[in-house]
Image (cartoon, rainbow, N blue to C red):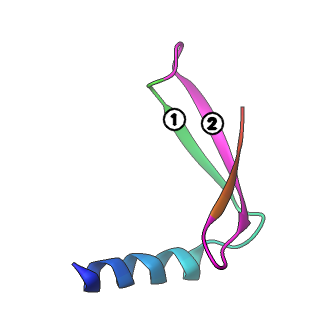
Amino acid sequence: MSSNKNKFESLLLNNFRVGAVIHKFCDFTNPPKNKFMVVGSTEPNLLTLMVN
């Protein structure tokens, strides 16, 4: 399991940059809608800001 976690962390750090926009369709909201998240920081932890 630790190996998979390290691969996932590497994937995130190599592909996410501060300012990147992530699109997510949220079907759990009422009504379902698109959400956008902006990457604010990658170190020491991934920080995203959700935009309605």
State the quadrant of the C terminus: top right
In what element is the residue under mark 2? strand
Residue occupying the point 36% across, 83% down: 7
Looking at the image, residue 7 sits to the left or right of residue 16; the answer is left
Residue beneath disc 1: 25
State the quadrant of the N terminus: bottom left
Q: How many marks are shown on the rendered structure?
A: 2
Q: Within 10 angstroms of label 2, few (less than 14), some, or many (20 or more) residues? A: few
Residue beneath disc 2: 35
Query: Does the magenta segment cover residue 30?
Result: yes
Q: Which mark is residue 9?
A: none
Residue 2: give x, y in percent of width and height.
Answer: 27, 83
Name the one closer to the observer, 40 or 27. 40
* Mark pair 2, 1: CA separation: 6 Å
In what element is the residue under mark 1? strand
Residue 4: give x, y in percent of width and height.
Answer: 28, 79
Farthest residue to the top: give it: 31
Give the magenta-colored segment's residue range. 29-46
Picture quadrant of residue 15: bottom right
